[in-house]
């Protein structure tokens, strides 16, 4: 008796060729609606679903496969005589392969806010068939991804249709329905509960395993949202480790925070140790490196643009572990070819690309905390409140904007000093803000960097005037911070005392 395949897909790419090959391998095709129509139009003989269900599609297509002749044919056990006999008694014929992908809910919510249309694009029969076929993987192949068609045909033709093969597709099927239901639940909570419902689902698709996690005894892997890495991350040399990926993320966020400007960020252990914006990327790299060349050794560099041969030659003068850029030219790649340990990645664009995630979360013991993603709005510095007597010049405002954005993406407590569009000092991850200020200035002095005339930014308010005193002693001329301390008046008085310009953004950007 011929085997039977039930094929009902929203994504119809490749389905005609797939079904032709199934027929060639002795399968009878059962199909529904649009899939049935496209198969007939392309010369594939198929049985319409209502011939199997003995019941018409009804309620405008809401019910067509929710039927014992469908689910019985998928679910009855072929290894139990009682099931086989009951199937014969009821007239239920086996369905040996189920090919289903689901109503396009994601595409629907991206194109419309019409709730009636959104509701109609919640698939019911599809997930039920997928789950039934997956449950009975002992006998049934479940196919949910058009990219798997060739592998399935090969398995059928090459006698690789083993229980282990079907089990791998079973796992993929339950991942598919779980992700689908998670997307619906998250959407409904976003629409009706402000995005924070009783359950929160974080679903990522695996991109690759990393050699290990943060340490060699830990397993690790990269998962993505919305194909961000699949579409915007190309390995040119080396292999991205778990730690590399974390550091890359921090560096890219900072380097791409200034639109199309020629920005270069150098990070170490997720924190910036160099940053600059200049007329050329070569100048930006040279200035970024001056901030802390000791930490930059073995660091990660994010280039908001194209790495040319000229820039590569300069970078190649020290050991850098990772470079990521919009693009890295072939000539530049040749410069790095002899360096065994360097890793090169590009995003396939003239500038760096951010995923612009709307949500953020962090694991804590026993769970995770979940929040709206933080972002510095372009008007925060532009519309910051001048609270001192002296106003900043245009160039000082530019330095303040850079310092403020970098500070918002640096571990708290932090302070950032910027001069002539280049970071000259940074203190981060400290338990007190004055320690961060003093640590940054100490490091700048060690590097022989003159902080005179720099802009100072803090991601949260200064609780005491001691940070202002230290900044003034170093020659800082302009300061931007959120404000909001009970001692703000003391901070303002200190700024006026030293002839500084002081601005309050009134927005805090902690990063813990």
Image (spheres, rainbow, N blue to C red):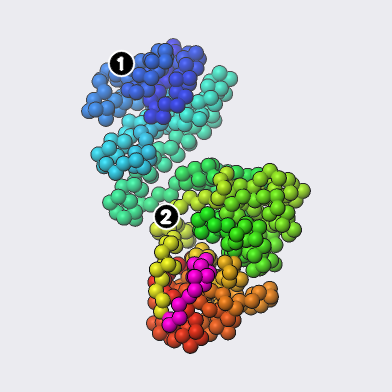
Question: Which residue shows up at 45% across the image and 26% down it?
Answer: 13
Q: Residue furthest right?
A: 338
Membership of 390 in magenta stretch: yes
The kind of secondary structure element at disc 2 is strand
Asked if 250 appears above or below 237 in the picture, the reply is below
Asked if 64 appears above or below 506 in the picture, the reply is above
336 and 63: which one is in front? 336
Of mark 1 and mark 2, the one earlier in the sequence is 1
Residue 484 picture location, percent across and down: 39, 77
| Label 2 Cα crowd, 10 Å radius (few <14 / some 14-19 / many 20+) | few
Residue 312 picture location, percent across and down: 70, 53
Instruction: Tell me the magenta residue range.
Output: 388-403
Membership of 16 in magenta stretch: no
Left or right: 258 in relation to 122: right
Between marks 1 and 2, how big is the CA–CA gap?
47 Å
Look at discs 1 and 2 and give the one toward the viewer: 2
Question: Which residue shows up at 47% across the image and 24% down it?
Answer: 14
Left or right: 158 in relation to 369: right
120 and 403: which one is in front? 403
Residue 395 picture location, percent across and down: 52, 70
Residue 185 visible in rendering? yes
Which residue in the structure is indicated by mark 1? 51
Rendered image: mark on residue 359: 2
Quarter of the image for the N terminus: give it.
top left
401 and 154: which one is in front? 401
Q: Choose top left, top right, bottom left or bottom right for residue 440.
A: bottom right
Rendered image: mark on residue 360: none
Residue 121 picture location, percent across and down: 31, 36
């Amino acid at each position: 008796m011929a085997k039977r395949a039930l094929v009902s897909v929203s994504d119809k790419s490749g389905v005609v060729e797939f079904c032709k090959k199934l027929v060639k391998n002795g399968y009878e095709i059962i199909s529904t609606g649009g899939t049935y129509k496209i198969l007939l139009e392309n010369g594939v003989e198929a049985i319409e679903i209502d011939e199997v269900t003995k019941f018409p599609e009804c309620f405008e297509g809401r019910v067509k496969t929710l039927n014992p002749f469908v689910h019985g044919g998928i679910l009855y056990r072929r290894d139990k005589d009682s099931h086989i006999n009951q199937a014969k008694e009821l007239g239920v014929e086996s369905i040996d392969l189920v090919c289903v992908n689901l109503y396009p809910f994601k595409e629907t919510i991206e194109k419309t806010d019409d709730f009636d249309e959104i509701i109609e694009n919640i698939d019911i029969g599809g997930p039920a068939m997928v789950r039934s076929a997956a449950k009975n993987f002992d006998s049934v192949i479940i196919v949910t991804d058009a990219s798997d068609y060739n592998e399935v045909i090969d398995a059928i033709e090459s006698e690789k249709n083993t229980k282990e093969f079907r089990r791998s597709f079973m796992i993929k099927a339950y991942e598919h329905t779980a992700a689908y239901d998670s997307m619906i639940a998250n959407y409904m909570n976003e629409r009706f509960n402000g995005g924070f419902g009783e359950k929160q689902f974080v679903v990522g698709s695996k991109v690759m395993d990393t050699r290990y996690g943060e340490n060699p005894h830990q397993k690790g892997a990269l998962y993505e949202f919305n194909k961000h890495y699949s579409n915007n991350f190309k390995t040119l040399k080396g292999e991205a480790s778990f730690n590399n990926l974390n550091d890359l993320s921090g560096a890219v966020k900072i380097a791409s925070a200034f639109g199309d400007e020629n920005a270069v960020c150098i990070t170490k252990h997720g924190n910036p140790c160099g940053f600059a914006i200049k007329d050329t990327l070569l100048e930006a790299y040279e200035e970024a490196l001056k901030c802390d060349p000791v930490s930059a050794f073995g660091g990660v560099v994010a280039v908001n643009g194209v790495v040319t041969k000229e820039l590569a030659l300069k970078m190649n003068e020290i050991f850098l572990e990772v470079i990521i850029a919009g693009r890295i030219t072939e000539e530049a790649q040749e410069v790095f070819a002899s360096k065994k340990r360097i890793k090169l990645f590009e995003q396939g664009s003239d500038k760096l690309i951010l995923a612009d995630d709307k949500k953020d979360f962090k694991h804590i013991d026993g769970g995770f905390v979940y929040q709206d993603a933080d972002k510095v709005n372009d008007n925060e510095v532009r519309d910051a409140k001048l609270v001192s007597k002296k106003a900043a010049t245009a160039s000082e405002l530019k330095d303040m904007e850079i310092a403020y954005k970098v500070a918002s993406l640096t571990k708290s407590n932090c302070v950032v000093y910027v001069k002539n569009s280049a970071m000259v000092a940074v203190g981060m991850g400290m338990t007190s803000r004055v320690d961060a200020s003093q640590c940054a200035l100490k490091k700048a002095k060690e590097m022989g960097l003159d902080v005179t005339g720099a802009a100072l930014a803090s991601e949260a308010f200064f609780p005491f005037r001691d940070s202002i005193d230290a900044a003034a002693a170093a020659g800082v001329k302009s300061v931007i911070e959120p404000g909001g301390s009970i001692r703000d008046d003391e901070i303002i008085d200190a700024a006026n005392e030293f002839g500084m310009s002081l601005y309050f953004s009134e927005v805090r950007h902690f990063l813990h």
